[in-house]
Image (spheres, rainbow, N blue to C red):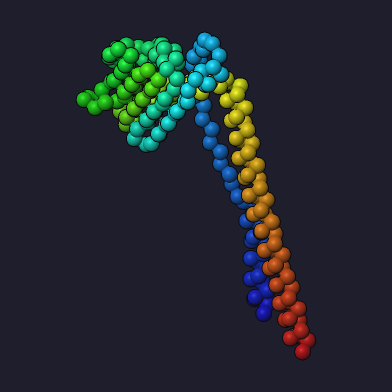
Amino acid sequence: MRIIIYVLLSIFLGMLTGHGQQTTSTTTASSSSISISVDGSNVDYQQKGRTYFSISDSDDNYKVRSEFHKDKTAKIRSYLLEELGNEYLTTSGNKYNWKRAYAGDMGYEVKLNSGTLKIYLDKELLSNGMIKKFKTITQNIKDYTSGKSSEERTAEKLKREEEKMGREAERLERQAEQKLREAERLKREAERLKREAKRKTDN
């Protein structure tokens, strides 16, 4: 009977000490920022048509598909010309196509038409610096087409992080309460077994 009591008390103490050993890791990433100047009101642009932005980022490739109001195409075209130049550029009317191959395999392709943008990267062929550059380009165009200021984006990011931290705190609180209830149950069970063992000894 003493062995049973010892085992239960060991489990109880192990649960209390194990709760304080949980580790949470957080990873942050930073990138450089390039601004796109905007003429006129962003609100007016937003009211004229919908904005669509899709980003797919896997181990092998990086893809972007976007639709935006046609009035923003000229600004985006100027920005891409500034960032990518015209060495790998072909044009046909309103269509601008940047396409660069490495040893016969396509490393990246950027297609800009009136109100649409497509980007494709082969991450196995491009350097980390080039991949980071394209991601910065993508983010800047996304910010521009969304019509949001940097202050609004920062506020939204902080709000999302605050909500995430609140949910995590609630989860940890529920977990702690569950552990405490379990510990109290084991303690009562240990005391019951102890009393039972004492009665048997007295008899």
Where, quadrant-wise, is the C terminus in this rendering? bottom right
Q: Residue at x 65, y 42 (%)?
A: 166
- Residue 153, placed above or below residue 34: below
Residue 191 position in % (x across, y down)? 74, 73
Q: Position of residue 172 (x, y in %)?
A: 64, 50
Residue lying at 51% horizontally and 12% vertically, measured from the top left: 38
Query: Looking at the figure, which quarter contains the N terminus?
Result: bottom right
- What is the residue that sits farthest to the right in this orientation? 202
Left or right of 17, for residue 62: left
| Numbered marks: total | 0
In the image, residue 107 lies at what x, y percent?
A: 29, 25
Residue at the spot x=42%, y=25% of the render? 67
Residue 132 seen in the figure: no
Residue 77 position in % (x across, y down): 39, 14
Q: Residue at the far bottom: name it.
A: 203
* Residue that appears at 31% across and 23% down: 109
